Amino acid sequence: MITRLPDAAKLVSLNRMTLYMAREIADQQAGRYEIAVVANALDLLARLAEAGETSTAEAARFLGISRSTAYRLLATLQSRRFVKHDRVSRRWSLDTPFVNMMTRVTGTHLRSAALPSMRRLLAEEEEPVNRAEFVDGELVYIHILESPQAFRMSNVPGERIPLHATGLGKAVLAVHPREQWQELVGGLELDPITPNTITTPEALLADLEEVKRRGWGEDRGETAVGVVCFGAPIIGSSGLALGGISISLPEARLDAGLAERLGTRVLEEATRVSAEIASRATSSRTDGE
């Protein structure tokens, strides 16, 4: 039998009130030390990371400040190469040095989030498993788990991946909105690495439609004759591709039904990594509140 203290309800109510007042005082003290222009700059950078670009007028409305103040703020960020300005469109976006700095931070989280999935794929298939990161329009191998079998990847960490000729590159391209595909593909050099490499924009765009439908990309001898690769994107909380994971093997070991299974498994693990990264981001925001 539980004996309830006569004033328990009052104590609970008092404790809640005390906690509320303490929270209010803490918030007031935090606000006392906050520098408005720094807060605006950080809010604007976060907005650009989410939206991709903004005009001066949009930035002013978002921050609730005048256009002249918003312009001075953006110009200051531009002088530090945090943002850049397109004189034709008159819009602002994050600049490459700042993106690279944030990518280095993200890369540490990406490695720890992806490693369990990579190890699962290696244990299941005993074929090389690769992780790449997508930075400033380029896809770069970062981590490779080698196969215990005789086959070894010829790629090495730090090597750039041709977007048009790899399953992983196509998977990353397909994450972008369709209205951007034409411009993205138009900016690529569709060099014929092997006789199987896609070398026309029309063929690559058609392939991207199939990748978009499946969720994973493949290449069959497009970068190395006799080698096949299946890749899927790792997507950040912004909806953009951070990179991806892939699995490679000799085409001679690709029996009936294996392509679908490998593509599906790579997609499952890449989706799991994306969810883990999103969970960590949410946890970090909650801890900071």
Image: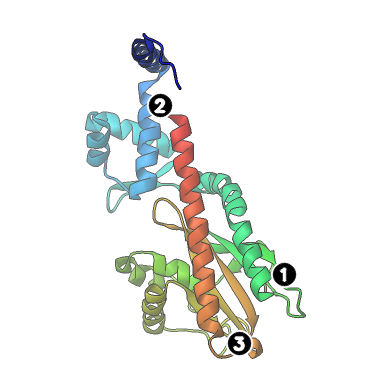
User: Which residue is most to the front?
Assistant: 1
Marks 2 and 3 close (CB-CB < 8 Å) = no
> Label 1 is placed on what type of residue?
Glu
- The span from disc 2 to disc 3 (Cα, nearest Å) is 56 Å
- Disc marking residue 146: 1
Q: The N terminus appears in which quarter of the rendering?
A: top left
Residue 169 versus residue 286 in the image, above or below? below
Measured from the top left, where is residue 222 in percent x and y? Answer: 56, 83
Counting residues from the N terminus, which is met first, the one under dot 1 or under dot 3?
1
Q: Quadrant of residue 149?
A: bottom right
The secondary element bearing badge 1 is classed as: loop
Q: Residue at x 65, y 72 (%)?
A: 124
Frontmost of labels 1 and 2 is 1
> Label 3 is placed on what type of residue?
Leu
Q: Residue at x 28, y 53 (%)?
A: 88
Marks 1 and 2 close (CB-CB < 8 Å) = no
Counting residues from the N terminus, which is met first, the one under dot 2 or under dot 3?
2
Density class for disc 1 (Cα within 10 Å; few <14, some 14-19, many ≥20) is some
The secondary element bearing badge 3 is classed as: loop
